[in-house]
Image (tube, grey):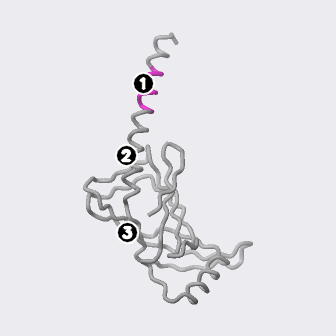
Amino acid sequence: MSLKKIAVIGTIAALGYFLLKDKAKKLTAQFGLVKIIPIGFKNLNGNWNSGKPSVSFNLDLNFINPTPQHFKADGVVIVLKRLLFYDKNNVFLGQSDINMSSLSIPANSRTIIRNVPVSLDLQTTLINAIAIINNGSFLPANIKTEAVISVLGIEYKLKQ
């Protein structure tokens, strides 16, 4: 391969990287404004026989885009890796490993993602259940979420 071809390929690759990086910054900033609200759960299961007992269930999530811009992540630049769930006192409740590479939310609208698998460590779940009982009622609106996204292979946490 000649030096000219290597220079052209290198220039195209560098230009593509900087364009993707700019797109990633814009998508990350816009996704930081998206609200993620749990709206229901089903299929509660307990795994008692493993070395680490756990509770799992499927959660329906409401992704709300309050911006006037359509949000579309196509998986080339941004991937929603995990959701971390906390109560109103910032006590960790559990997480969901999603690895969602395609997400589209219309402007000033919402998208519901159904049956997102969530797994909770049983010890953490019992401690949190006792804390909830001691503090009063538990409301889904009090759940805080933190999204872990991967942008060009680098992970970022976005608080909701």
For the record, the magenta segment spans 9-17
Q: Helix, strand, or loop for circle 2?
A: helix
* Amino acid at circle 3: Asn
Q: Among all residues in the image, which is located at the extreme right?
A: 51
Frontmost of labels 2 and 1 is 2
Frontmost of labels 2 and 3 is 2
| Residue shown at the point (74%, 72%) measured from the top left | 51
Residue 98, image x and y in percent?
A: 50, 60
Left/right placement of residue 124 relative to residue 135 reads right
Residue 128, image x and y in percent?
A: 60, 80
Disc 3: which residue: 62
In the displayed structure, 130 sits above or below 32; it is below
The disc, 2 or 3, on the residue closer to the chain's N-terminal end is 2
Camera-side residue of 87 and 75: 87
* C-alpha distance separating marks 2 and 3: 22 Å
Disc 2: which residue: 26
* Amino acid at circle 1: Ile
> In the rendering, which numbered label is found on residue 27?
none
CB within 8 Å, label 2 to label 3: no
